[in-house]
Image (spheres, grey):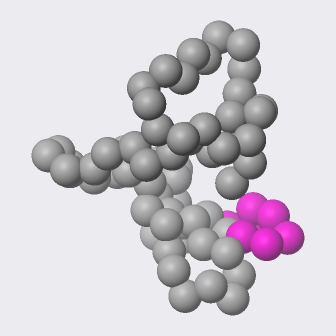
Amino acid sequence: MRWYRSSETAERGFCQHCGSSLFWREFGDEHVSIGAGTLDPPTGLRTARHIFVRDKSDYYEIEDGPEQAPQA
């Protein structure tokens, strides 16, 4: 695994062999966010809310019920 500084505030962890994005974390935060697509099913996960919906493209329709936040 390798970490890459992807912005002024965060870095991303990825597989050094295949390049898959696995994690991300904000600088100074003790929490690491894990990409849900990296987990083997059954995960038991459910969508809590959709973020950055203001920036979604016109071909997305989000109609599954959870809150839709314009930003994070």
Number of disc labels: 0
Residue 40 in sight from this viewpoint: yes
The residue under the point 20% across, 51% down is: 43
Does residue 7 appear left or right of residue 26 in this picture? right
Residue 16 in sight from this viewpoint: no
43 in relation to 54, above or below? below
The residue under the point 54% across, 23% down is: 62
56 in relation to 33, above or below? above
Q: Position of residue 10 (x, y in %)?
A: 72, 70
Residue found at the very far top of the displayed protein? 59
| Near-viewer residue (25 or 5) | 25
| Magenta-span inclusion, residue 9 | yes
- Which quadrant of the structure image shows residue 12? bottom right
Q: Position of residue 60 (x, y in %)?
A: 60, 17
5 in relation to 40, above or below? below
Please give the range of residues in magenta: 4-10
Does residue 68 appear left or right of residue 56 in this picture? left
The quadrant in which the C terminus is found is: bottom right
Does residue 41 appear left or right of residue 66 in this picture? left
Q: Position of residue 13 (x, y in %)?
A: 54, 66
